[in-house]
Amino acid sequence: MGQILDFNSNNNNAKNNTTREIDLVKLLPKLQNLKKENIVIHITDEVANNDKLLLKLLREVVILKYIEVTVVLILDTNKFIEDFCVKNLKIKKPFEKQSFVKITEEIDVFDMIFKHKVADRVSSFLKNFNATPLCISGHNLDIIFPDEIVYDKLSFFDFQKKDVRNYITEKKNKKYSIVTLEELLKTNIIPVIYPSFKDRIGNTYIQESACFGSYLSSCMSSLKYVEICANKKSIPTNCIYGIDRLSKIIKTGYFSKNDIVLMEACINAIKKGTQGAHIIDIQNVSLLEEFCSQAFKGLFIYDDILNQI
């Protein structure tokens, strides 16, 4: 087990969290408290494309899996979706007016690009740790989000709202449906999911990656929703915020649009039932140590009402 924790055996600088070992013996008692819990992790583009950071993260993900934590990975696909939409569909800024785009005919193409450009690297790293990844799209996992996510007042598709509300289906009283994913999570497989989902009548949508992770986390009633990023110097670190206070801070205009997306995704996850959310710069912080610490090095977000710290 020691070998799997040695991030860089040629660099013994203990002050550099990117390269030092984790003292797993000290962490194990607290990590055991996570056993049987659900954790959804969204991996941003800058981490997914950096072999060193991705390797560090996935080692710790595999450790979580070994102690029987249910881990779901969501990969950032925003950039290649936007590029594809501009080049092939003549759609500029597909996530500008709403957090998702409706795609049906092109969905197989997106799946293929996702596997080739994003998922294969993650899958190969996990296999090197003797883990069993499965890279698959959300719509093929039968993930169905609540109607209000697709047809809310801010939605581009609001004109379809009346038809959907009148549609008769045996699932109309269910909040969501992730039956296939729930069965998958009972195995030793680590799902690596492409951010797509279906509505009640079979339309397929691709969602902004952080928002997809947020909704999935809330639907699974996850213990934690985690954003893994790098170089996000403007996002607060070494602190804990309730969702009400963080919402006010976001409105100051200090943050970039991408930073706001990450923070709002965490806030929405908690509002809809996730117990807590983390934004972690994996360059400087260990995922496992952050889970076990009471002095957070990243940003930890909680529900003000429940006062969960």
Image: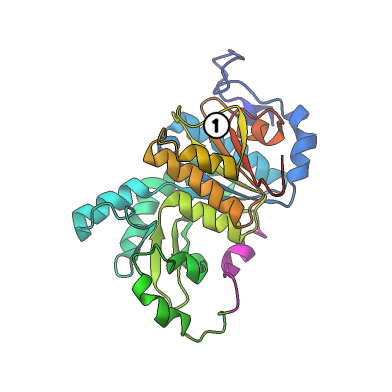
Quadrant including the N terminus: top right
Q: Which residue is mark 1?
A: 56
Amino acid type of disc 1? Lys
- Image position, residue 156 (x, y; %): 34, 65
Left or right: residue 94 versus residue 145 is left
Q: Quadrant of residue 155?
A: bottom left
Location of residue 31 with respect to 155 vertically, above or below: above
Q: Quadrant of residue 45?
A: top left
Residue at image coords 57%, 70%: 177
- Image position, residue 127 (x, y; %): 54, 44
Location of residue 174 with respect to 42 vertically, above or below: below
Judged by its main secondary structure, the magenta piece is loop
Visible in this render: residue 190?
no
Location of residue 227 with respect to 294 vertically, above or below: below
Q: Residue furthest right?
A: 29
Question: What stretch of residues is rendered in magenta?
Answer: 173-187
